[in-house]
Image (cartoon, helix red, strand yellow):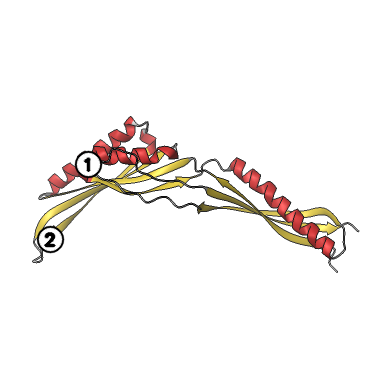
Amino acid sequence: MSEAITVQGVGRVEARPDGATLELGTEARAESVEQALSAASQALTTMVAALHANGATETDLRTEGPSTYTVTDNAGRVNSYVCSFRLTARISDPARAGILLADCVAQAGDGALVHGVSYTLRDRGEHQRQARVLAVADARARAEQLAKLVGRPLGRATNVTESSGSGGPIRPMRAMAFAADAAEAVEVEPGVEQVTVGVEVTWVFAD
């Protein structure tokens, strides 16, 4: 019979996200590429100003573009041009995501685009420590039960390995619906993220 027992334990802790990223953009369609670029750029400037007014800094924002393409008729003739920009905004208070979305859309008007919202858990340290305690306790409980079942006393731990990870939000974000003249906050729900720590522990028997 082996003189050691190896078991796995898992600890899980739920945590509210402490950061969010807004994926926004602007788009305009016009008879010339210059007009489309000007309109999309103006909408982008307005959207950036709205974010600055709500506390965003230059390091919180990133723009990409412009991207342009032509729209043709059935005969292949160009009848308009479309220009778009993409804007990513990091915010430190996830609870304000809906307010900022609504404000950006209201300020940029029909040229506003919303690609989505993602949530992050930036400070994982304390949650991982809590999950680690639970994981080791889970492993010990399993080992003690197995040792008892085979009639052996459990001794000291001789080896421990750890794996950690996190799941996505386990409560989905509510659907977003808004108009270009939105005056109220868009209803979004960050949910909770699950921080998981797994351990594998080897104990020797005490006898």
Numbered circle sitting on residue 148: none
In front: 168, or 6? 168
Left or right placement of residue 174 versus residue 11 in this view: left
In front: 36, or 47? 47
Which of marks 2 and 1 precedes in the sequence? 2
Q: Residues within 10 Å of mark 1 (few under 14, many from 20)?
A: some
Q: Amino acid at mark 1?
A: Gly
Residue 65 visible in rendering: no
Q: Residue furthest right?
A: 207
Say which quadrant the N terminus sits in. Answer: bottom right
Q: Residues within 10 Å of mark 2 (few under 14, many from 20)?
A: few
Residue at numbered disc 1: 109
Q: Please tell me which residue is depicted at 78% across the width and 58% down the height of the picture.
A: 143
Residue at numbered disc 2: 72
Percent across and percent down for residue 90 are 40, 40
Left or right placement of residue 37 versus residue 178 in this view: left
| Helix, strand or loop under label 2 | strand
Q: Amino acid at mark 2?
A: Thr
Say which quadrant the C terminus sits in. Answer: bottom right
Q: What distance separates the C-alpha of mark 1 from that of mark 2?
A: 25 Å
Q: Please tell me which residue is depicted at 36% across the width and 34% down the height of the picture.
A: 58
Q: Nearer the viewer, mark 1 or mark 2?
A: 1
Percent across and percent down for residue 92 are 44, 37
Percent across and percent down for residue 200 are 70, 57
Residue 136 visible in rendering: yes
